[in-house]
């Protein structure tokens, strides 16, 4: 008998779902026993349901090929097969809020990639290196839901992972004003060039809802726990433009920043490369050894060379220099479907297991 925690994936046939499947192959703590998707896929084997939609570089793991896809809406049935769930379904926000809560109420923890619950005051939104203490609010969420072990935890939007970690590393220098432009990969929209040929050689200056998320979500990450809720920070002020570019994987950010206490460039680089968090301390299975790397070359970070740093779980920063209008400017890069989506959620689940929030049901 396997002693691994049994996990299911809601939205397993989609792009983020597939990334979960790939990342969890041979995971030391978690075993994928259930895959669920829409009624269109339910009843088929995972291999049949995904068919030519498999978008990962690595082959579909043998262990999931023959799993029969369940229907996400059959909550009790799906919940009965697992210890906890990852959620990556694409439904309306109201539907996602309702279904994730329904699963939590079956006493099944849900670690979600979706944005629906990111602003629910007692749902923690966590980058485990930065704000693992926010998981504390799970206790008040369980009281609200009337559960003993069921809850929802979420990870933030993919776009912020290319600059929020650097700003977190620089907290002591008090970032005050931040201007960001993101250059975002097409996999962030669940697409490849095959299904979105108009994106070849193209730039589209609009990603629905992304600028608001990029400006506000870092403030919730830097917020504090008060009376069982997360109260967002009020500083720094962030303004952001989000642009879709002709890249498959990897979100780049060009950032300007003013500090309350202006540091030297050397102090900033030292703070980046020495920044460590709970995942590194606990040596969690998906934790990058080096969370943030600093690249000295003028032409780095580059998507093709650096997106897979630390298997896509590390963040690359470069081109840090003084600016004429702001104190400093720099470029950041992170992998949007690994650190920014499924990998970030797996690291949250590992942290939750290590802290005793996710346990076997029986
Ligand atoms: N792609 C990224 O980098 C990224 C990053 C952060 C967050 N997200 C978010 O993650 C979620 C999934 O994104 P994705 O890119 O993986 O989308 P996707 O490729 O379109 O996959 C959507 C998944 O949801 C299922 N689904 C769709 N409608 C459903 C319904 N009515 N009932 C039950 N299941 C349904 C699909 O099942 P079928 O195959 O049966 O249709 C599929 O498994 C979205 O909310 C997205 O905003 C994505």
Image (cartoon, rainbow, N blue to C red):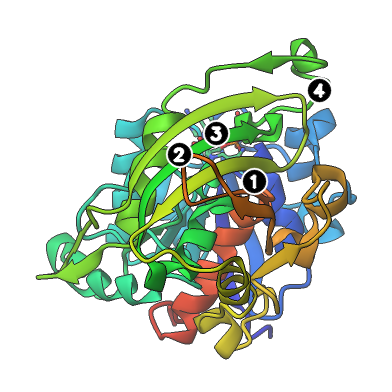
| Crowdedness near tag 3: few (<14), some (14–19) or many (≥20) residues, C-alpha within 10 Å | some
Determine contact: label 3, label 2, CB under 8 Å: yes
SS under mark 2: strand
Q: Report the residue at 69% width, 29% height from top.
A: 186
**Hey, which residue is sitting farthest top in the picture?**
198
Q: Earlier in the sequence, mark 2 or mark 4?
A: 2
Q: Report the residue at 27% width, 47% height from top.
A: 119
**Hey, which residue is sitting farthest left in the picture?**
227
Label 2 vs label 4: CA separation? 30 Å
Determine contact: label 1, label 2, CB under 8 Å: no
* Front disc: 1 or 2: 2
* Front disc: 3 or 1: 3
Q: Report the residue at 44% width, 76% height from top.
A: 352
Q: Is residue 26 above or below residue 110?
A: below
Q: Earlier in the sequence, mark 3 or mark 1?
A: 3
* Front disc: 4 or 3: 3
Residue under circle 2? 179
Label 3 vs label 1: CA separation? 15 Å
Label 4 vs label 3: CA separation? 23 Å
Residue 241 x, y percent position in the rendering: 49, 28
Q: Is residue 130 above or below residue 40?
A: below
Question: From this viewpoint, is residue 41 visible?
Answer: no
Along the line of sight, which residue is nearer the eye, 256 or 361?
256
Locate residue 133 relative to residue 79 in the image: left or right: left
Q: Is mark 1 within 8 Å of ligand 1?
A: yes
**Numbered circle sitting on residue 181:** 3
* Front disc: 2 or 4: 2
| Crowdedness near tag 4: few (<14), some (14–19) or many (≥20) residues, C-alpha within 10 Å | some
**Numbered circle sitting on residue 193:** 4
Determine contact: label 4, label 3, CB under 8 Å: no
SS under mark 4: loop
Locate residue 43 relative to residue 210 in the image: left or right: right
């Amino acid at each position: 008998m396997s002693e691994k925690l049994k996990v299911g994936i809601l939205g397993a046939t989609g792009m983020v779902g597939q990334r979960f499947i790939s990342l969890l192959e041979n995971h030391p703590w978690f075993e994928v026993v259930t895959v669920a998707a829409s009624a269109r896929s339910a009843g088929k084997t995972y291999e049949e349901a995904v068919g030519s939609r498999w978008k990962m570089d690595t082959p579909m793991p043998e262990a999931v090929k023959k799993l029969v896809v369940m229907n996400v809406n059959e909550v009790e049935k799906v919940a009965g097969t697992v210890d906890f769930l990852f959620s990556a379904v694409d439904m309306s926000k109201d539907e996602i809020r309702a279904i994730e809560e329904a699963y939590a109420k079956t006493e099944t923890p849900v670690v979600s990639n979706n944005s629906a619950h990111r602003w629910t005051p007692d749902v923690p939104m966590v980058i485990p290196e930065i704000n693992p203490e926010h998981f504390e609010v799970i206790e008040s969420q369980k009281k609200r839901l009337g559960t003993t072990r069921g809850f929802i935890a979420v990870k933030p939007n993919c776009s912020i992972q290319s600059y929020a970690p650097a700003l977190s590393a620089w907290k002591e220098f008090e970032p005050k004003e931040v201007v960001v432009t993101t250059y975002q990969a097409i996999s962030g929209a669940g697409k490849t060039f095959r299904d979105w040929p108009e994106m070849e050689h193209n730039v589209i200056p609009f990603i629905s809802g992304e600028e608001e998320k990029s400006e506000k979500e870092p403030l919730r990450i830097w917020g504090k726990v008060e009376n069982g809720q997360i109260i967002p920070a009020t500083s720094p002020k962030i303004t952001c433009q989000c642009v879709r570019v002709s890249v498959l994987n990897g979100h780049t950010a060009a950032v300007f920043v003013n500090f309350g206490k202006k540091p030297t460039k050397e102090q900033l680089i030292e703070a980046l490369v020495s920044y460590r968090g709970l995942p590194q301390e606990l040596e969690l299975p998906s934790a990058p050894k080096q969370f943030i790397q600093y690249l000295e070359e003028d032409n780095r970070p580059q998507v093709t060379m650096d997106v897979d740093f630390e298997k896509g779980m590390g963040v690359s920063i470069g081109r840090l220099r003084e600016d004429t209008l702001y104190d400093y400017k720099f470029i950041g890069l992170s992998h949007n479907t690994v650190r920014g989506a499924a990998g970030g959620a797996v690291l949250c689940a590992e942290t939750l297991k290590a802290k005793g929030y996710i346990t076997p049901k029986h």
